[in-house]
Amino acid sequence: MSKKITALILCMILLFAPTSALAAGGGTAISTPEELAAIADDPGGNYYLDADLDMTGVDWAPIAFSGTLDGRGHGIYNLRVTRLGDVTARTVDGNNKPYDTVFAGLFSALNGGTVRNLTLQGVDIEIESAQHCFIGGIAGYIYNATVSSVRVLDARLTLTAACQPEATDPRTSCNAGVGGIAGFGVGTVENCEADVTLVFIDKCAASLRCEQFMGGVLSCGNVKITDTQVKLRGYDECRGYAHNGGFVGMFYVFNPGETARPISRCGIDGAITFFEDNYDRRAYCEAFVGEMLTWTSVTDVTVNFQRNEVFDYSAVLRPEKCAVPTLTETVHTADCHDVGYTEHTCTVCGNTWRDSFVPQAHVPGEWIVSTPATYTESGVRVQLCSLCGKTLREEVIAPHVDGEWVTAVEPGYGQPGLMQLLCADCGAVLAEEPTPALIGADRVTISPAALEMDYKSTAVISWTLEPAEVYQPMVYFTSSDERVVTVEANGTVHAVGRGTAVVTCTSADGFAKAECTVTVKLTVWQWIREYILFGWVLKH
């Protein structure tokens, strides 16, 4: 009794742990297979997928999980599992006989946890075990767990039971099962979809009379199943006691004091092909529940199910009909609406399967703020596919913190500018202020307006700009003929030759200008020197 009380307390702790973690924050983002595997370091935490995950080439180790995993509409593709998880738990058969059991799946065990809004596509679980064993697409074992809005698609789960009596373990039976979503346990499955191929191979010693379970959702246990659709291809080579069902292999309330959980608003489309090589045959195989050991309510269900019992106990019951298949391959490219994959078809027996899945090929667009942040409240921004508009990523925007004012639009002449106050964290515009347009020169006035200068003399042209608030209070001087006059930047004019030139004073912005006509003459002495003395010398 003390062990049962301890187990109950542990399960209650695990059950409520995810709720408090969820309330504490948004959880930990997962965007790579390595980050998914890191869940094992904190299996009671709160997680969400921030991207689709391609598990190709990953040697996945099933995790015992008790937290929350929210797929947020993302998928885990090409998951392959060939080894068991480390956790063991107790399962029972129809006689309530206990077994220490091992498990495999995405999670080995889901204790009081939640998995939601997630797609698993291209799942390949292949386990051979000499121990009591259950496997499932999501988890081999669930206890008071919830699986909601989850799709397990293009999945093949193969369990080979190979229990043998040994001198150190004189076992008298074997307990094993395979379920599309869960192996063994108690919990809730709602609004889910399973498109699965389930294979059970019995290599146990015949004397053990293996207790075998197979179900499109659950192989054995007490699970509430609502609004769930199943496509099932089941193959069962059983040399003990077979319990096969479209939804549940054996429905059983194995915990004292619990009530049977209903099955409602569900559909099954598929078949189970099996044999039961046992002189004490039971051969349970039904559309909903193989064996309803505890009665439960099954309502509002749709059925397209075939029970295919085989009496050739040497038959190999697998999807593959050819030992050496002749295959054709067709590659389907991913787009915004459909995943990509490679389809394999045997041209002899017609067996078809798909693998090498590629997530939908969305094109990331711009980030859009869906819920603006304030100074006191966080906001949310989303990234949409630029082709189809699907939400690809979502991020929390922290409350705003005043940053610096920056120039958003430079002012121009006649055109106001704009300053913006940005959030120091997210860069959002918190405030805006216009800056005045630049003022150009209306008029430049120079003095004098005309100059008569002696050769080699200097003069200064003064200037004023209007209006006084002009943005660039500077002018530039140019000479039309630098053989006559040159002019410095400050307006100093140098007479360097006889003749007439125009000095132009232009405002720095180019909007206004004024001109000064400069006439350079020779003095009497300069005239005598240049034309009489030096001119006579040059002539002679």
Image: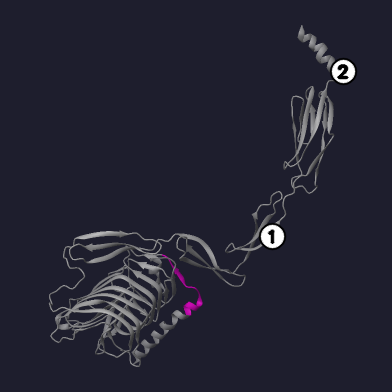
Q: Is residue 539 above or below residue 324?
A: above
Amino acid on which the number 2 mark rests in the picture: Val
Which quarter of the rendering shows the C terminus?
Answer: top right
Residue 143 position within the rendered picture, expressed as x and y whole percent measured from the top left: 35, 83
The residue sitting at the right extreme is 524
| Dot 1 or dot 2, earlier in sequence | 1
Q: Mark 2: few, some, or many residues within 10 Å (few <14, many ≥20)?
A: few
Q: Quadrant of residue 178?
A: bottom left
Q: Quadrant of residue 52?
A: bottom left
Give the numbered dot on residue 433.
1
Which quarter of the rendering shows the N terminus?
Answer: bottom left
Q: Quadrant of residue 95?
A: bottom left
Q: Viewer-nearest of labels 1 and 2?
A: 1
Can residue 28 be found in the magenta stretch?
yes
Magenta span of residues: 20-31
| Front residue (pair 496, 88) | 496
Amino acid on which the number 1 mark rests in the picture: Glu
Does residue 531 appear in this view? yes
Q: Is residue 529 left or right of residue 338?
A: right
Does residue 132 appear in this view? no
| Front residue (pair 48, 89) | 48
Give the numbered dot on residue 451.
none
| Front residue (pair 495, 287) | 287
Q: Which residue is mark 2?
A: 524
Inter-mark Cα distance, 1 to 2: 67 Å
